[in-house]
Image (cartoon, rainbow, N blue to C red):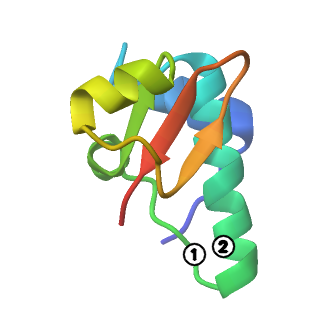
Amino acid sequence: MIKTLSAHEFVTDFEGIRPGSFTRPALLAIFDYLESLEEETGDLIEFDPIAICCDFTEYADLEEYQKDTGDDDPEIFLELDGDAFLTYGW
């Protein structure tokens, strides 16, 4: 059984299950990324907030990322407003 979520539903449902895990801009970036991934691959992605929390990390800036990981060149990231960004690793 599949239910298609709008960006608003994705953010609202996510915040209801995992409040405070990501900022609203980060959740919208994740939604856009996952939606694009579905279109590219033709595969539907299950709405799983726990897995999303495991796959994505939001950082305020590159310095915070470097301090956390020791990596000075994030391999894959989504830029958010300002200097904040998300990393994801699957």
Q: Mark 1 near mark 2, Cβ–Cβ under 8 Å?
A: yes
In this view, 43 is above or below 21? below
In this view, 37 is above or below 27? below
Q: Earlier in the sequence, mark 1 or mark 2?
A: 2
Q: Position of residue 47 (x, y in %)?
A: 45, 54
Query: Looking at numbered disc 2 in the image, what kind of residue is underneath it?
Result: Glu
- The answer to whether one can see residue 4 in this image is no
Seen in the image, is 11 located left or right of residue 66?
right
Seen in the image, is 66 located left or right of residue 11?
left
Give me the residue at 48% from left, 16% from top.
60
Q: Which mark is residue 44?
A: 1
Say which of 55 and 7 sits in front: 55
For label 2, the SS is helix
Q: Which residue is mark 2?
A: 38
In this view, 36 is above or below 8? below
Q: Position of residue 42 (x, y in %)?
A: 68, 86
Circle 1 crowding by C-alpha within 10 Å: few under 14, some 14–19, many from 20? few
For label 1, the SS is loop
Q: Nearer the viewer, mark 1 or mark 2?
A: 2
Say which of 87 and 69 sits in front: 69
Residue sitting farthest toward the bottom = 42
- The answer to whether one can see residue 28 in this image is yes
